[in-house]
Image (cartoon, grey):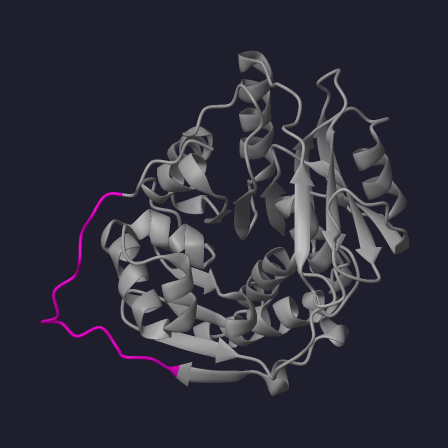
Amino acid sequence: MIVTLTPNPSLDRTIELAGPIERGEVQRAVAAHSEPGGKGVNICRALEASGISSLAILPGDADDPVLLALTSQSIPHLGLPIGAPLRSNVAITEPDGTTTKLNEPGPVLSLAQQDALVELVLEQSVGASWLVLAGSVPPGVPDDFYARIIGELRTRLGSHAPKVAVDSSGGPLAAAALAHPDLLKPNGEELAELSGLFDGDTLEANPDLVVDAARVLIAGGVGAVLATLGAKGAVLVTAAESWLATTPPMLAVSTVGAGDSALAGYLLQSNLGASAPDCLRQAAAHGAAAASLPGSTVPALHQTNPSAVTVTDLAPVLASEPVLATHPKEDDQ
């Protein structure tokens, strides 16, 4: 069982255009799609489509459109009633795959609701293999929310606590990294901010520099880093090894949720006891498959092509090699 927490879920609407966005003009869409969304929700959708048992935890009333959509799709979930509607997000995709996202802030969660959400996560994590803390946090929730959950989870469950993966950004991601999660999944820009090294474009262009940046986080206590680099592939870095996964060139239809699907692919193989390189291979295959699908559609395992993914060993960590150390940058998100 893989449990996910999405504290700021959404109803994701994707609008496809026939040409580039023309600011200030009226344009007609060629297609539109709506899906229950938020990183953890998307991960559960991808896992369930591939036959992996999961549970999505999120705030939201039973009659909210997001939870109704999860019910209609038979996605196992638990919602914490909050008496307020969840947000809606809009993604606009152009024919070349360029995606513009407009995200609402989400409802404010009171301190009591935050406490109840943490307790729900702790209760449902018993017996789970992974807990995924995913996405932004809504208004009123402090940046250390994920770090708090990691600490309380390990205090309560000890050696029986599930592994923890974090996929967020800004302050919540930086704070969670200091709580020693088993896996972080940043993109290039987020990795640059966390490590204090380089910038997102530089990292996407050079996987060896991705390894350098990831080692900063691992030296600080993070178990492993899965860095997704868009069309450039993905890099997995552990304490001792690192690998690059690349896929054949393709024309992206929509990049919405591609990173979420990549993490789902990694977790899917991890849950089956696969090696680290094979987990990375499936992550890249899932991410590529998601980018080839419209809107925020997530791929099932049979829609992915891991045999087309090339996994390359990068430079190993040497015992005598110095490890860079720095503090994660703060973010005002």
Give the dominant element type of the magenta stretch: helix, strand or loop: loop
Q: In the rendered image, is residue 313 in sight?
A: yes
Residue 151's place in the image compared with 46, above or below, is above
The picture places residue 276, in percent across and down from the top left corner, at 45, 72
Is residue 95 inside the magenta stretch?
no
Residue 49 falls left or right of residue 208 = right
Residue at left offset 38%, top offset 54%: 191
Residue at left offset 23%, top offset 55%: 219
Residue at left offset 51%, top offset 73%: 233
Is residue 318 inside the magenta stretch?
yes
Residue 58's place in the image compared with 240, above or below, is above
Along the viewing direction, whichever of 196 and 109 lies nearer the viewer: 196
The residue segment tinted magenta is 313-327
The picture places residue 149, in percent across and down from the top left corner, at 46, 33
Q: In the rendered image, is residue 256 in sight?
A: no
Q: Which residue lies furthest to the front in this view?
A: 24
